[in-house]
Amino acid sequence: MQPTLRYSEVDLAEFKENILKKLESAKTEYKYLLNQIRSENENGTDDTASAYVSIDDGSASQQKENAGKLAGRQQKFIDNLETALVRIENKTYGICKVTGKLISKERLKAVPHTTQSIEAKKNQYK
């Protein structure tokens, strides 16, 4: 019996459903982070106590910087998920780009945007 070279239509449909759910959640999180970056402060109002403002300014800047980093990571995750959807449409989803073998379903469920099997990933660090 020859090994499976790609996932079935049924499997691909399941993976697509999983990715679409993760994509929706990721986009919601991304929008939240962008709102955090754009907002004046948590309450949406300017505080008038100068001591509070000066202490809070540093904290707010750091929070916005952290939100910016998280938003960047989230955008990369969204891009990776969208690329995974293209691979599903091309019927190449789930095929390891290093070994050419199928990536395990468990790995694809945990990391739906992956392009490498665990075997390939481990060999990457040797």
Image (cartoon, rainbow, N blue to C red):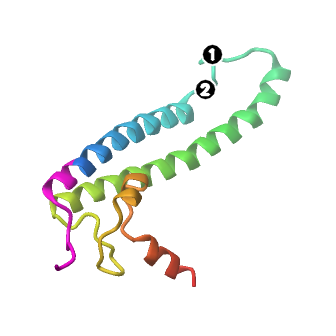
Asked if residue 62 is positioned above or below residue 78 in the image, the reply reads: above
User: For numbered disc 2, what is the local secondary structure?
Assistant: loop
Q: Which residue is mark 2?
A: 40
Task: List the single residue furthest toward the bottom.
Answer: 126
How packed is label 2: few (under 14 Cα within 10 Å), some, or many (20 or more)?
few
User: Residue 105: percent from the left, percent from the top?
Assistant: 34, 59
Check disc 2 and give the amino acid type.
Glu
The quarter of the rendered structure image containing the C terminus is: bottom right
Q: Residue at x 34, y 67 (%)?
A: 103
For the residues labelled 1 and 2, the Cα–Cα distance comes to 7 Å
Q: Residue at x 29, y 58 (%)?
A: 84
Q: Is residue 47 magenta?
A: no
> Could you say which quadrant of the image residue 104 lies in?
bottom left
- The magenta stretch spans which residues? 1-13
Q: Which residue is mark 1?
A: 45
Question: Between disc 1 and disc 2, whose residue precedes?
Answer: 2
Check disc 1 and give the amino acid type.
Thr
User: Residue 100: percent from the left, percent from the top?
Assistant: 29, 79
- Is 2 situated left or right of 21 in this image? left
User: For numbered disc 1, what is the local secondary structure?
Assistant: loop
Q: Residue at x 25, y 43 (%)?
A: 17
The quarter of the rendered structure image containing the N terminus is: bottom left
Looking at the picture, tell me which residue is in the foreground, 39 or 125: 125
Task: List the single residue furthest toward the right.
Answer: 51
- Is 19 situated left or right of 76 in this image? left
Task: List the single residue furthest toward the front.
Answer: 1
State yes or no: discs 1 and 2 in contact (Cβ < 8 Å).
yes
